[in-house]
Amino acid sequence: INGEKDTDVWLVKSTDGGETWTVPVRVNDDPPGKQQFLTWLTVDQSNGYLYFVFYDRRNYNNNQTDVFLAVSSDGGQTFNNFVISESPFNPYSGVFFGDYNNISVVNNMVRPIWTRNESGNLSIYTAIIDMSTGIPEKDMSPTAPEQNYPNPFRESTVFSFKITQPGNVKLSVIDPLGKEIIVLKEEYMVRGKYTFSFDTSNYHLSPGVYYFNLLSSNKSFKRKMVIANN
């Protein structure tokens, strides 16, 4: 109803066999102006919770696409949305996708399934989500980087980390006193998993203890690394 540039997911329901229907309720909880599409719905028969899985472009200004899950614990009056895909994909318009999407839930165990269309290459993804502990919080901060490997090291080491919300990210090396020594990267990053290789031959660092520092969304994460003697 908002035009092709602002498609939404809506819920209407009938409790009298289709004689009358409720006023539509908007399932996606983002501000107007983005696209949500190709949804699938199921109900957990153990508690009546409603679950929707759908494609979502709320975090981007282009066709990059995430997969979101929406859950309602009050019969569809309100919804909580959270992303379930690890990284966005950029679909190719010449290849149809979405016909393998589905979702099932039994006793709080949610199993969505969706198709990724990555530049025309199709793949099927799924997840197992345990909702028994409640609806997940919308944590938009980065996750702490994994410990670098190898560590200690002499010449090079590798770090991996995830970004859960697009934004500006700064990667740096600091000394034990917290002084910034090297800025490795400072740029806008989209949501996803990243791997970064740190090669000491590009810098003049003495053997000793340093820290890899990840800064994003005003949160900072550190990992200790040791440069060994040759």
Image (cartoon, helix red, strand yellow):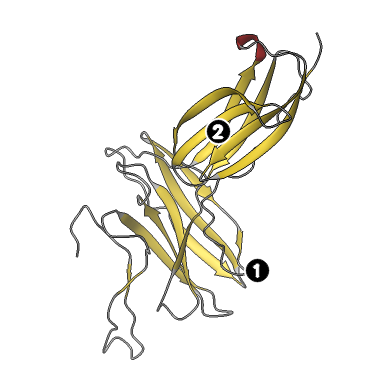
Q: Residue at x 36, y 38 (%)?
A: 90
The image position of residue 214, as x and y in percent, is: 59, 36
Left or right of residue 90, residue 137 in this image:
right
Q: Is residue 120 visible?
A: yes
Q: Secondary structure at mark 2?
A: strand
Kindly give the residue lying farthest to the right in the view shown.
229
Judging depth in this view, the residue of 171 and 104 nearest the camera is 171
Judging depth in this view, the residue of 3 and 91 nearest the camera is 3
N-terminal of the pair, mark 1 or mark 2, is 1
Give the alpha-carbon distance from disc 1 to disc 2, as whole Å. Answer: 29 Å
CA neighbours of label 1 inside 10 A, class few (<14), some (14 to 19), many (20+): few
The image position of residue 142, as x and y in percent, is: 56, 44
Q: Quadrant of the N terminus?
A: bottom left
The image position of residue 192, as x and y in percent, is: 51, 40
- Residue type at the position of mark 1: Thr
How many circles with numbers are drawn on the protein? 2
Which residue is the site of mark 1? 133
Which residue is the site of mark 2? 194
Give the vertical position of 197 relative to 110 (above or below).
above
